[in-house]
């Protein structure tokens, strides 16, 4: 909370994430406050990066975002479309627009629609803080991401949402700034920021100049693999086989596999909502009629029609957390007649994510190499994001740097808090900065 000498906020930090978004305010005395929103589960300082759309008579297309979108996903109210992980589309020139109930939404409009809801908060209605810093990943998600296109789209979306003057900073820089804010000595810090869609690494040299914290970027790297990828591995091995993956259907005299795209859609959360179209559901029901395991495809249809994607991923998130705390865990998902149970071991989970871990490790090693450093030259390693709690991920760092140099930040708040301070410091507004 802000100190007694803090009056109005002077810096705004925005961590627009794949899964969750966070907003923080910086004050002149150096204090930082994270915004909170009401939800069905009480106050939350993470705003789920999700939108829910529906048509309402003459009012046309309506929407809610964040906790309100989740509430409608858990308790569906008629025909609706749940949109999430929109950040993963930013760098793809192939995704330009979609149609929701006949209305055109560009990727910029989708992001701006979400951000407008994110900024619709009492703390921001009195006026935008003088300085705004928003995070961006080191490497955007997707195959062959177009970085310039992604940043341009982000800037357009922020402007459409009312934030017309925004500085973008690498997300791990925000986390590093938060870590180093009280450091009195020069140190080289490796920041590992694990989001939903990307794992980003930055090496920075922090020092003090006349009391002002200065950060010199030494190297950056990243990869489009992170928490969502781990979730997908669990779904692919634990859930999808119970929803028809690997089963067959009959076509004339041939036995053919169920088309892969139905289950490939589980790779990223947002893709589940795209399956809820009349054409896709009609094809799925036609396959069910000739399937060798029709009940499994019936359950898949129910999952799509009833918008159960969020609850499924919430259950998978719980399984992942359990496997971080124990060597094995029991998975249960029971909704609308769908019943899936399985025993999962950490050993199996680590085998399923082995290739993902290797890609993450390569990106981290490249960052150190680009900086012209050895592992021994790094004074501190700051880990942030929920994936940093996965034992196999932490082991990756302890093997290279040793446990004593590892520091774990708040899984969700570090980036936005650091960005708020960066915004204030770059504008020269913070006392002693």
Image: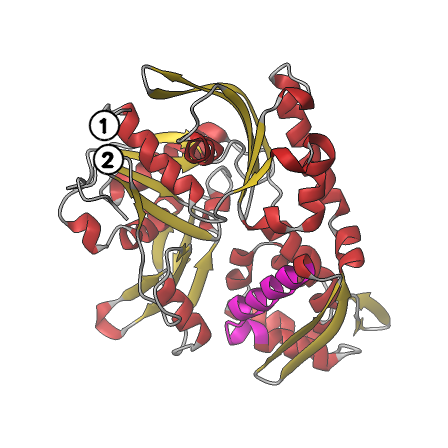
Q: Position of residue 365 (x, y in %)?
A: 68, 27
| Vertical arrangement, residue 424 with respect to residue 295, above or below | above
Residue ID at (64%, 19%): 377
Left/right placement of residue 29 relative to residue 215 reads left
Q: Residues within 10 Å of mark 1 (few under 14, many from 20)?
A: few
Range of residues picked out in magenta: 303-323
Q: Quadrant of residue 24?
A: top left
Residue ID at (48%, 49%): 18
Question: Would you say the magenta stretch is mainly helix, strand or loop?
Answer: helix
Residue ID at (54%, 34%): 145
Residue ID at (38%, 49%): 22
Whether residue 400 appears in magenta in the rendering, the answer is no
Left/right placement of residue 193 relative to residue 375 reads left
Please tell me which of labels 2 and 1 falls first in the chain: 2
Cβ atoms at labels 2 and 1 below 8 Å apart: yes
Q: Position of residue 263 (x, y in %)?
A: 67, 62
Q: Quadrant of residue 121?
A: bottom left
Q: Give me the C-alpha separation between circle 2 and circle 1.
A: 6 Å
- Quickly name the residue at label 1: 431
Using the rendered image of the protein, determine whether residue 80 is visible from the camera's viewpoint. Answer: no
Left/right placement of residue 408 relative to residue 353 reads left
- Quickly name the residue at label 2: 29
Q: Position of residue 40 (x, y in %)?
A: 37, 72
In the foreground, 35 or 114: 35
Q: Determine whether the residue tagged by mark 2 lies in a helix, strand or loop.
A: loop
Q: Determine whether the residue tagged by mark 1 lies in a helix, strand or loop.
A: loop
């Amino acid at each position: 909370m802000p100190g007694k000498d803090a009056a109005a906020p002077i810096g705004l930090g925005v961590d627009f994430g794949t899964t969750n978004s966070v907003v923080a305010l910086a004050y002149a005395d150096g204090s930082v406050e994270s915004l909170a929103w009401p939800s069905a589960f009480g106050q939350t300082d993470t705003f789920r990066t999700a939108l829910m759309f529906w048509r309402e008579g003459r009012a046309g297309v309506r929407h809610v975002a964040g906790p309100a979108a989740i509430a409608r996903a858990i308790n569906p109210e008629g025909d609706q479309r749940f949109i999430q992980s929109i950040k993963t589309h930013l760098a793809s020139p192939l995704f330009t627009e979609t149609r929701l109930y006949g209305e055109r939404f560009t990727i910029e409009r989708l992001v701006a629609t979400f951000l407008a809801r994110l900024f619709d908060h009492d703390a921001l209605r009195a006026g935008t803080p003088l300085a705004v810093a928003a995070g961006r990943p080191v490497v955007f998600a997707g195959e062959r991401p177009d970085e310039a296109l992604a940043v341009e789209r982000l800037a357009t979306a922020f402007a459409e949402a009312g934030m017309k003057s925004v500085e973008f900073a690498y997300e791990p820089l925000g986390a590093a700034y938060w870590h180093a804010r009280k450091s009195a000595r020069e140190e080289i810090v490796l920041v590992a920021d694990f989001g939903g869609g990307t794992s980003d690494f930055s090496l920075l040299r922090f020092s003090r100049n006349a009391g002002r914290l200065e950060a010199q970027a030494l190297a950056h790297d990243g990869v489009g693999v992170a928490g969502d990828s781990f979730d997908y591995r669990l779904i692919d091995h634990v859930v999808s086989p119970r929803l028809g993956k690997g089963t067959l259907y009959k076509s004339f005299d041939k036995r053919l596999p169920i088309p892969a795209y139905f289950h490939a859609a589980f790779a990223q959360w947002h893709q589940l909502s795209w399956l809820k179209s009349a054409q896709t559901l009609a094809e799925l029901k036609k396959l069910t009629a000739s399937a060798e395991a029709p009940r499994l495809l019936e359950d898949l249809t129910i999952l799509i029609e009833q918008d159960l994607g969020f609850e499924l991923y919430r259950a998978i998130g719980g399984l992942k957390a359990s496997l971080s705390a124990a060597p094995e865990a029991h998975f249960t998902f029971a909704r609308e007649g769908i019943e899936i149970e399985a025993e999962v071991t950490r050993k199996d989970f680590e085998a399923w994510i082995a290739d993902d871990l290797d890609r993450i490790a390569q990106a981290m090693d490249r960052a150190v190499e680009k900086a012209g450093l050895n592992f021994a030259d790094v004074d501190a390693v700051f880990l942030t994001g929920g994936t940093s709690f996965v034992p196999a991920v932490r082991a990756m760092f302890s093997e290279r740097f040793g446990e004593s140099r590892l520091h774990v930040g708040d899984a969700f708040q570090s980036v936005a808090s650091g960005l708020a301070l960066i915004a204030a410091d770059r504008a020269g507004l913070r006392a002693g900065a």
